[in-house]
Image (spheres, rainbow, N blue to C red):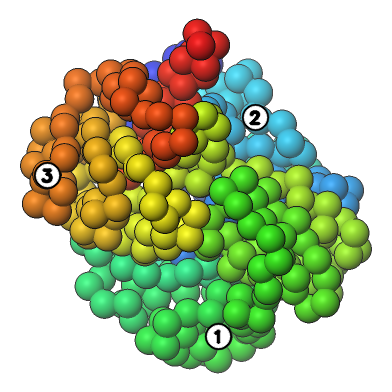
Amino acid sequence: MNYQESREYIDRVTREIPSVLGLDHMRELMKRLGNPQDDLKFVHVAGTNGKGSVIAFLYSALSRSGYRIGRYVSPTLYSYRGRIEVAGSRIEKESFAAYLTQVADAITAMTRDGYPHPTAFEIETAVAFLYFKNKNCDLVLLEVGMGGNLDATNIIKNTLLAVLVSVSMDHMSFLGNTLSEIAEKKAGIIKDGCHVVTALQKPEAMEVIEQTCKKHQAVCTVADASRAETLEESCLGQTIRYRGETYQIPLAGVYQKENAVVALNALEVLNGLGFPTSQEQRKEGLEKASWDGRFTVLCKEPLLIVDGAHNPAAADMLAASIEHYFKGKHLIYIMGVFADKDYKSVIRKTAHFADKIFTIQTPDNVRALPAEELAEAVREHNPNAEAKHSIREAVEEAFAIAKPEDVILAFGSLSFIGEMTDIVEEHKKQK
């Protein structure tokens, strides 16, 4: 397959093969591919909100310290290939096509032998493992897709460090209906004898994590963000002091202090695991980190911010940021959500801040909630909701009614942020 054909293959699998949790199919697939993941070392990151930001901080700091770091994250906003990176460069089109062809051949043999067809995420994960091994990565930063214990990424054995960011209610139909049940699934990435860094969790989640660490004789470090002091902040970034050191963080949002503290604790643990970093390298790593779509400013007059708030916990964080940065401001929303998310809770936590809300249907995704259905749900909390036929229409209408001092906030799903960013850039050039 060439690159175009390989992308069409993934798109077809995405449409035809439903997402499942379980490792049996992945184990069989990786066995047929020679288990490349067994030759790699990992920092495995799970949790509900903050995985990508923590990985962004770690990726920046470790790469600047001279290590050859692989990064596997999802979803990505601007480039499909950006989910698989080594040393700051995305997987090449030719490499992706070649490894996908290898994986597809193994799947053909699997299905011929009576095994079920792997999912798109399992296929992408297999490609990533093959690529990281070929690139001789010193360490791979690996983001869980969903949950932890039964996620395709959890086939790995060589977990040096398991990182657990904030755990909250999400994917309940897959992971459970209580915080303890969800925490148990996410803590499933903890392996015998590995090290663990966790954000300070709610008591029921913290108890599960501590019990899991004890069971696996894993050394656990709790990263308590309350010990960090915010010195300066705006919607463009912030400065914090932690353990006597000052750090510049380019990522805005009140929750980024917690993510930075988790990353700093992870770097400290990695110091003793063969991946030392200096204080200056950590400072530079945090300062130069980038993670698009997480309270990211796309335009300054009017201020337009995109954020991936797609579940109740993320909505809480977004609401806190709105109150913190934009109290008294005229707010315009652009919202698009997935039907299988708890979007009603997201609406309940955020809709009352807005003066006008435009809803859109995230394009080319079977999980997307129609714009009118979303508008109807919003109107239960804010009558000023209007469905739009496209992202472009919503963006143009928002700019048309916004004054220079107003704020446009786009959120609900990361899946439409990439297209919206392109539209905003076009608008800025036309001004």
User: Residue at label 3?
Assistant: 383
Above/below status of 32 relative to 79 = below
Pointer 1: what residue? 213
Using the numbered discs, state the Cα–Cα distance from disc 2 to disc 1 in whole angstroms: 34 Å
Amino acid type of the residue that numbered disc 1 sits on in the rendered structure? Cys
Q: Check disc 2 and report its element: helix, strand or loop.
A: loop
Which of the 4 image quadrants contains residue 227? bottom right
First of labels 2, 1 by sequence position: 2
**Residue 46 shows in this picture:** no
Q: CA distance from mark 1 to mark 3?
A: 48 Å
Could you tell whether 427 is left or right of 223 in the image?
A: left
Q: Position of residue 53 (x, y in %)?
A: 58, 53
Disc 1 secondary structure class? helix
Sequence order check: which comes first, mark 2 or mark 3?
2
Q: Residue at x 55, y 85 (%)?
A: 213
In this rendered view, identify the residue nearer to me: 68 or 251.
Answer: 251
Residue carrying label 2: 91
Q: Residue at x 66, y 63 (%)?
A: 260
The answer to whether residue 305 is above or below residue 52 is: above
Q: Earlier in the sequence, mark 1 or mark 3?
A: 1
Q: Secondary structure at mark 3?
A: loop
Q: How many other residues sit within 10 Å of disc 2, few (<14), some (14-19) or many (≥20)?
A: many
